[in-house]
Amino acid sequence: MSFYARLVRPALFALDAERAHELILTTLAHSLLCRTLALQRNVPRDPQLQQHILGLSFDHPIGLAAGLDKQGTAAAAWAALGFSFAEIGTVTPQPQPGNPRPRLFRLRDDRAIINRFGFNSVGAEGVARNLAAGVPPGMRVGINLGRNKDTPNDRAASDYTVIVDVLHPWADYFAINVSSPNTSGLRDLQQGRELKTLVGEVVARVGTVARRKIPVLVKLSPDMTDADLIDSAAAALEGGAAGIIATNTTIARNGLRTNGSLAQQTGGLSGAPLRAVATHACRVLYRQFGRQVPIIGVGGIVTAGDAYERIRAGASLVQLYTALVYEGPGLVSRVARGLLDLSTRDGFTSIAEAVGVDVT
C-alpha cells in the first residue's frame, strides 16, 4: 500500500470533501512541493507514448480533466505530477460563487464523487493572473469555458468569447462546456442549431484575437442517446470545432454500491461508475467520425487498463480527475508505464496506432 493510501488519503478523507479539495490545491501551489514532486516523478519519456493531434504534440496521452483546478492556481504541480496537459476551469467571464455548500460528496464504496459546484470561478481575469504566475515550459494548457449562472442561453456566446479574449495567451486549446448538469439550462446548448451557432462564434473570436491557431473542442454529456450524441458532435463540427471531449459527469445513478441519501445527492457523478458509459460514447463517436475527429476520453479512468481501453475505443488523449483523489500522486506514472507496457505487448510501435482498434 502506498504512502498516500496509508496516511495521506485517510487524513484528507477525515475532512469535509471541499475543504480537502481546497487544502490540496493550496498545498500544490507551493513551489518547494512542486520541485519535490518533480524529483520523484517517474513518467516514462518514450516516443511510443507521444501523441500529435489538434496541431499539438503531447509527451504522452494523459491529462488532467477540468474541475480540479478551476482557478489555474496549480499548473506547475500538474506538470510535476507528470501530466502532459491540464484543462483549467470551468472558467466564467465574471467571478461567481457557485452553488451553496455542501456541494462535493465522496462515494467511497464506488470510488466516485458527486459535485454540484455550479461553476464557482474567480472569473477570467482572476484565472489570467494565476496562469501568469507561471505555466511550466512544455505543459499544454486547455481552458474550459462556461457561462455565468445568470446569463441566458441566447447570450451565452458573449460569455464564452469574453473568456477567449482574456485567456487566449495561455491556451493551447479551448473546451466549450455545454454539458455540466449543475448550471440550469446549460445542457440545452447541446442542441444542434444552438451548438453550431455557439461554436461558430467562439471559433471566429479565436481566429480574430489569437496570433496562432488554437483549436476549439466541445465537451458533451454522457446522458444523451447515441443518436443525440452524434447529432451534437456533428453540429459542433459544422460550427468549426476541432474535436470532442467525451464525456462530462452524469446525472444517472445506476448500479451504485453506495446506498441512501448520499448516492442521491443532486449533481454530476464522476469516477469509476462512469467508465462504461464514457467508453461507449467514445466508441459511438469514433464509429461515426473516425480519425477525422480527435476525441479526448474522460470519465472513470482509474488504471492503465482503463486508459488503454479508452484509447482502443477511439480516444487519442485521456483525462483523469476523480481517480487522482483516490489513488494519489503516483497515478500518472503508473498509468503511463502501464500504457507503454500494454501497447508494446500488442505490437504497437506508437500509442497512436491503438486509437480506435476495437471499434467495428
Image (spheres, rainbow, N blue to C red):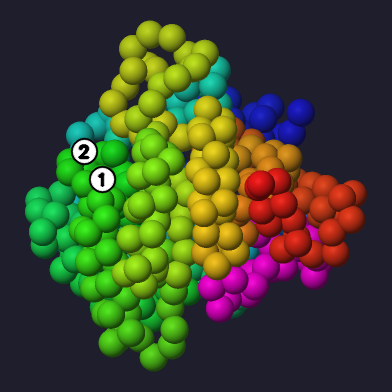
Which residues make up the magenta segment?
A: 43-62
> Rounded to the nearest whole Å, what is the CA distance between mark 2 and mark 1?
17 Å
**Picture quadrant where residue 328 is located:** top right
Name which residue type carries label 1.
Arg
Q: Which residue is mark 1?
A: 187
Horizontal arrangement in the rendering, residue 113 relative to residue 43 (left or right): left
Q: Residue furthest top?
A: 260
Residue 322 percent location from the top left of the image: 52, 38
Neighbor class of circle 2 (other Cα within 10 Å; few <14, some 14-19, many 20+) is some
Q: Which mark is residue 249?
A: none
Residue 190 seen in render: yes
Q: Classify mark 1: helix, strand or loop.
A: helix
Q: Nearer the viewer, residue 60 or 179?
A: 179
Residue 71 seen in render: no
Neighbor class of circle 1 (other Cα within 10 Å; few <14, some 14-19, many 20+) is some
**Picture quadrant where residue 156 is located:** bottom left
Say which of marks 2 and 1 sits in front.
1
Q: Residue at (21%, 38%) from the top-left corner?
A: 99
Q: Which residue is mark 2?
A: 99
Whether the residues at callouts 2 and 1 have beta carbons within 8 Å, the answer is no
